[in-house]
Amino acid sequence: MPLSHRIEAALDRALDRARAGAAPPRLSAALDYAIKPGGARIRPTILVSVARACGDDAPALTDAAAAALELIHCASLVHDDLPCFDDADMRRGKPAVHRAHSEPLAVLTGDSLIMLAFEELAAAGVRDAAEARSGQLVMALARRSGMPGGICAGQGWESEPQVDLHAYHMSKTAALFIAATEMGALSAGHDPEAWHDLGALIGEAFQVADDLRDAVLGESDLGKPAGQDDLHGRPNAVAQLGVIGARDRLSDTLAGAIASIPSCPGEAALAEMVRRQAEAIMPVLPARYSA
Amino acid sequence: MPLSHRIEAALDRALDRARAGAAPPRLSAALDYAIKPGGARIRPTILVSVARACGDDAPALTDAAAAALELIHCASLVHDDLPCFDDADMRRGKPAVHRAHSEPLAVLTGDSLIMLAFEELAAAGVRDAAEARSGQLVMALARRSGMPGGICAGQGWESEPQVDLHAYHMSKTAALFIAATEMGALSAGHDPEAWHDLGALIGEAFQVADDLRDAVLGESDLGKPAGQDDLHGRPNAVAQLGVIGARDRLSDTLAGAIASIPSCPGEAALAEMVRRQAEAIMPVLPARYSA
């Protein structure tokens, strides 16, 4: 099965669990709306790719882990879009959940997706007598999602007058990429620590790529100067390094990510996956930046 | 250790985990504010009491389960108090979290407490090589908290034009009491199914006691007729049965709860605990209702 079909099938199974029996129909519909159609499913793609590189000897657990990680990511998008945070009208090309389904249902959608993520992981462990791995997966996912170092903490830093920038970036952007590589390894019974740096470096690359896209779009399409988006005093690779410097940083970070891949049966295929992801996120720079 | 100290100590350990290292200080403070000082801690009290009745042979797991259940309950209070739901100014005698700490921090507090609950459960399982029980606990807690039958579903029913009243009450009020008895049994390695009815009946008793308190307070203190609180078309025991009928229903439900306790080593002590909880929730009726 192609990797993308595998991930969508795992998400469908999770959604079926949440909408079984006497579920309130509107909240059920909002859960579906928040999950499908998805974005690039980058985090679960990395997770399954790492699990395959490690042998993927418990594929049902890997599927549950991939679904759980994407559920948490989607939950964070729904809550981050709320009026009290980004007040976003649109997400993935359609109205944000709170615009399409009401603000109460958006809060409950996020909460329900978080519960569902952990239920999926535990259910897979119980079903396949893989409770030890499942418990490690729950811990890894909770740790990268909550406080003090997960995406909740990352969002929480935006309410602080003084920001610990390293903690902010590690928790806000890198945490779920680290979860992806750690959980991929854990699903296949491998040591997650060896896989930490790959996730952290991919997370850093995505941050720099975002900064570049903002800057390039800003200059060529919107006519605003680079770094203008940095309203919260967040560090920005383009503001620090310029466009060319940030592009070089992105290339170096991705090379470092590939170099960090631990020795494992599927090392070459995994390096290829990271290269493909890198090509997908590398922005096309306007002609004036060409050497 | 008295049961209440045991529960507070377990909650303190969980909070310490969430506030370790480089946590954003304001969100850390909001987590603490949402948890302490607590209310009656009824759900974890029931959980630990059931675990003791079942032998409590893995007390660290019981502690984690009690903390996790109370964390989910507190998370639900923080989110239910948000402006888009109840817009509550006060909770437990002090300003609600979103009033004291801002609405973004209230959303994040709820999310963080949910993550922390599952992390606590999984961590206790991994630490004590009790992953099988821990996995069952994660499943039970997630199922009674999320969709389709947990407290998220219960809150979700309030956004529906047509309400399945049985599903509404079971999910909104009874779910976390069922979680309390199921998780108490699971912590001690007992079959949770045998403990379902005790939780459901205690949950029903709390619902009737709430209706009675509303009605009695309404008539004697606020001068409003019984059933006036029923703005959402929710069924109300006093509206259906009158004050005396509802009081009798409450007594019968609590007697049924005690009768439902499965045969176990600590059956008598557990029955006594339920009787004490019953006395605590039985409202004092104005003199005119005396026989």
Image (cartoon, coloured by chain):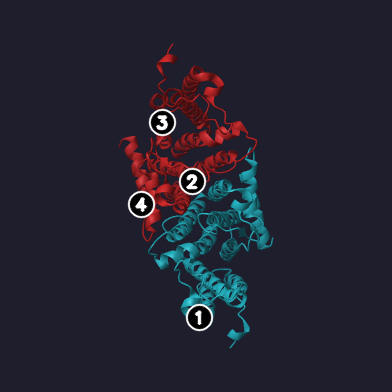
Chain colours: A red, B cyan
Q: Distance between the residues labelled 1 and 3?
A: 66 Å
- Amino acid type for the residue under numbered disc 2: Leu
Dot 1: element: helix
Protein chain holding label 2: A
Q: Quadrant of the C terminus of chain A?
A: top left
Q: How far apart are marks 1 and 4 (CA)?
A: 41 Å
Q: Name the residue at 52% across, 28% down.
A: A228
- Amino acid type for the residue under numbered disc 4: Asp
Q: Which of marks 2 and 3 is nearer the N terminus?
A: 3
Crowd class of label 4 (few under 14; some 14 to 19; many from 20; radius 10 Å): some
Q: Do labels 1 and 2 share a chain?
A: no
Crowd class of label 2 (few under 14; some 14 to 19; many from 20; radius 10 Å): many
Q: Quadrant of the N terminus of chain A?
A: top left
Residue A9, position as x, y percentages in the image? 33, 43
Q: Distance between the residues labelled 4 and 2?
A: 25 Å
- Which residue is tagged 3? A53
A108 or B10: nearer the viewer:
A108
- Which residue is tagged 4? A16
